[in-house]
Amino acid sequence: MIAFYTDFFYNVIIAWSLHFFLKSFTTHLPWASCDHEYNSIVCYEPSWNDGKDSECAQPLNKSDIGVISAAEEYFYKEFLGLHMPGAANSSVAHSLSNLGPLNWEMAFCLLLVYIICYFSLWKGIKTSGK
């Protein structure tokens, strides 16, 4: 029974990996910039730090000045459909009582992972190389 629940957990992680793998083939990575509708005003791009250090005092970390990376906003807001606690334009948080809409893109990735698992178990991994 534990293996059954572990299977769900790992297949979701594989589906997440598949999603990011497929998104990485686009010319512009969606998590690389702050020019999307889900980004807040406190969003920053890591490429903004590519220049020389300014002469101003640098904060110890990004949480000191309340900014959120574009990748973090993509993961929480666009990918998971959650809000960012403490962000400037936080929407209503989804919980077990309010799950929000179905993420069809992730549902398709999860279905694809289960189809791959099914065919791997059906004939065995030895026949997939023939």
Image (cartoon, grey):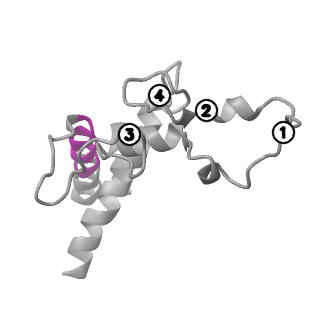
Dot label at residue 56: 1
Q: Camera-side residue: 101 or 113?
A: 101
Q: Quadrant of the N terminus?
A: bottom left
Residue 76 position within the rendered picture, expressed as x and y whole percent measured from the top left = 38, 46
The magenta region covers: 105-114
Q: Is residue 35 positioned above or below 59 on the image?
A: above
Q: Amino acid at mark 4?
A: Pro
Give the SS element for disc 3: helix
Q: Secondary structure at mark 1?
A: loop
* Residue 82, disc: none
Q: Which of these two is toward me, 124 or 109?
A: 109
Camera sees residue 130:
no
Q: Which residue is mark 2?
A: 45
Image quadrant where residue 130 sits: top left
Q: Nearer the viewer, mark 1 or mark 2?
A: 1
Which amino acid type is shown beneath numbered disc 3? Answer: His
Residue at 15%, 41% (x, y): give it: 102
